[in-house]
Amino acid sequence: AAGVIQSPRHLIKEKRETATLKCYPIPRHDTVYWYQQGPGQDPQFLISFYEKMQSDKGSIPDRFSAQQFSDYHSELNMSSLELGDSALYFCASSLGETGELFFGEGSRLTVL
Amino acid sequence: GENVEQHPSTLSVQEGDSAVIKCTYSDSASNYFPWYKQELGKRPQLIIDIRSNVGEKKDQRIAVTLNKTAKHFSLHITETQPEDSAVYFCAAMAGGTSYGKLTFGQGTILTVHP
């Protein structure tokens, strides 16, 4: 069965650079969530989209932005990267806002 | 917003013993409570979930109980095996204006000794 696809899986950037993470939800899933997980931490909700509209916003820095496109894939754009942005970034998708969340394999961002 | 507290932070058991992890939540409007197992560097994987109209749910060696009045839910793993060793997260799906957003507990590192 198709799963949530995230790319790239690993990314290394310098401070103050920009990074873009991509997420392709499970086909027919209309809701996408982004989570950030630091080392030894629980996943922290960043932002979600339902039917291409932002549905909720969590602890997402102003330096970050995201959108969901017409094909339902989503991109998380991170600018002016800081050392503290180093983390695993998970995308998850669901059918509707109350459906089970399916997580992607994650994108590991390292900021040097 | 929703706040989820999870205990214990670490749990060590012998193979074959049972393990219990407990969580409390703050938002009485929350109505969906999943449990995830996460191995190092891997994605969270759903192992069991429960909705607020059910008090208990079981799937082979794993069970979850929910007490809506007390706002707490628990994960029970019986006959633990070394491959059960991982980090377990509880979560609550918020209601109201944050519908659909999952708030996670702090995680429990479960170690099952052979």
Image (spheres, rainbow, N blue to C red):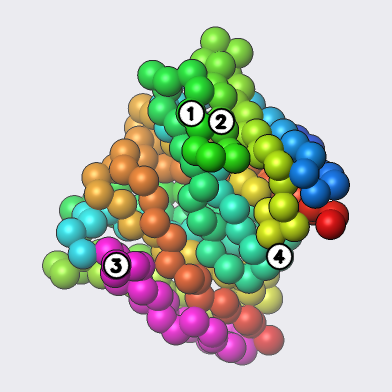
To the question of a shared chain for discs 3 and 1, the answer is: no
Q: Which residue is mark 1?
A: B57
As for residue A18 lying within the magenta part, the answer is: yes
Q: Amino acid at mark 1?
A: Lys
Question: Which element carries disc 3, helix, strand or loop?
Answer: loop
Determine which of the numbered discs, if any, sits on residue B64 in the image. Answer: 2
Q: Are marks 2 and 4 in contact (CB under 8 Å)?
A: no
Task: Report x, y in % for residue A32.
Answer: 32, 57
User: Which callout, 1 or 2, points at the residue further toward the start of the chain?
Assistant: 1
Q: Are marks 1 and 2 in contact (CB under 8 Å)?
A: yes
Q: Amino acid at mark 2?
A: Val
Q: Which residue is mark 4?
A: A39
User: Which residue does the image show at 79% across and 39% down from the upper left?
Assistant: B17
What is the C-alpha distance between the residues marked 4 and 1? 31 Å
In this image, B26 relative to B54: left or right? Answer: right
Which of the two residues, A56 or B49, is positioned nearer the viewer here? B49
Task: Report x, y in % for residue B109.
Answer: 76, 51
Determine which of the numbered discs, if any, sits on residue A59 in the image. Answer: none
User: Which residue does the image show at 69% across and 59% down from the upper left?
Assistant: B83
